[in-house]
Image (cartoon, rainbow, N blue to C red):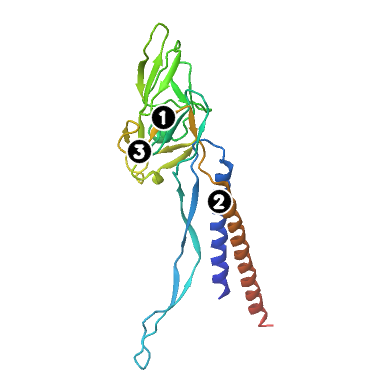
Amino acid sequence: MANIALQSAATGLSALNTKLDVIANNLANVNTNGFKASRANFQDLLYMERAQPGVENAQGDQSPTGLYVGLGVKVSGTQVSFEQGSLINTNRPYDLAIEGDGFFKVVVEDALGNGTAYTRAGGFSLNADGELVLANDQGRRLDPPITIPADAISVKITSDGKVQVLQPGSTEPTEQGQIQLTTFVNPAGLKQVGENLFVETVASGPAIEGSPASENRGRIRQNFVEASNVDPTYELIEMIRTQRAFEMNSNTIRAADDTLRAIAQLRR
């Protein structure tokens, strides 16, 4: 009956609406440093089995096909792409980009992720105590903490995460700390909590912490930030495809409605 077509098309509209929401969020964050684009994955729903394949007829011949009618589609999940974004030179000493795999670890409130979250956004600044913090509205502190002396003449952060500071009266820089990077077996399983932050989940696996440029971790580039990895051209193409698919499902609903109206008028 046409009511199955109505229900299937309705699930299509709902799924496509979710995909459009994901695309809109990607495009909204096209200039957000460290942002990672997401995509909506679809899967089909259950099927009504009206005839099984392989059924024998009176002559013993088997039917080569069955008769199945699907009941629509749903969004199975959103998948984050951790493809490397382009590196932008800012000439700011506290801007850090990760070239390769890994996340910076920052301190958050316990309610977010047991006090720890992870980010690729490496735009850092100093707080009132001279600690490296994310340069955003919350000022999340880098973990383990790195403190820069107030009289520092210059700060150098090496590709393997060593923070070296030159102070007045010294000819050689002193090491102030070591930046660590964290990797996960399945980064796509991390939970997104906003502020370009991710928190660990069962699906992501436990955090594996170590020094940059070691054990397949990326290296740190000082004076750079990682741009968003959103591809605007791809997103616009996907938006057009989503609009066209939405229109086709809308036409299916109109066709099914016309069919049901014709059936209802048969009794007159």
Give amino acid for label 1: Val
Q: Are marks 3 and 1 in contact (CB under 8 Å)?
A: no
* Vertical order, 100 against 42 (above or below): above
Q: According to the image, label 1 marks what residue? A: 106
Residue 120 drawn at (x, y percent): 45, 35
In primary-sequence order, the first of circles 2 and 3 is 3
* Vertical order, 38 against 148 (above or below): below
Residue 188 drawn at (x, y percent): 41, 46
Pointer 3: residues within 10 angstroms few (<14), some, or many (20+)?
Answer: many
Q: According to the image, label 2 marks what residue? A: 234
**Residue placed farthest to the front in the image?**
171
Q: Residue 217: which numbered mark, if any?
A: none
Residue 210 drawn at (x, y percent): 31, 32
Q: Residue 183: which numbered mark, if any?
A: 3
Element carrying mark 3: strand
Give amino acid for label 3: Thr
In primary-sequence order, the first of circles 2 and 1 is 1
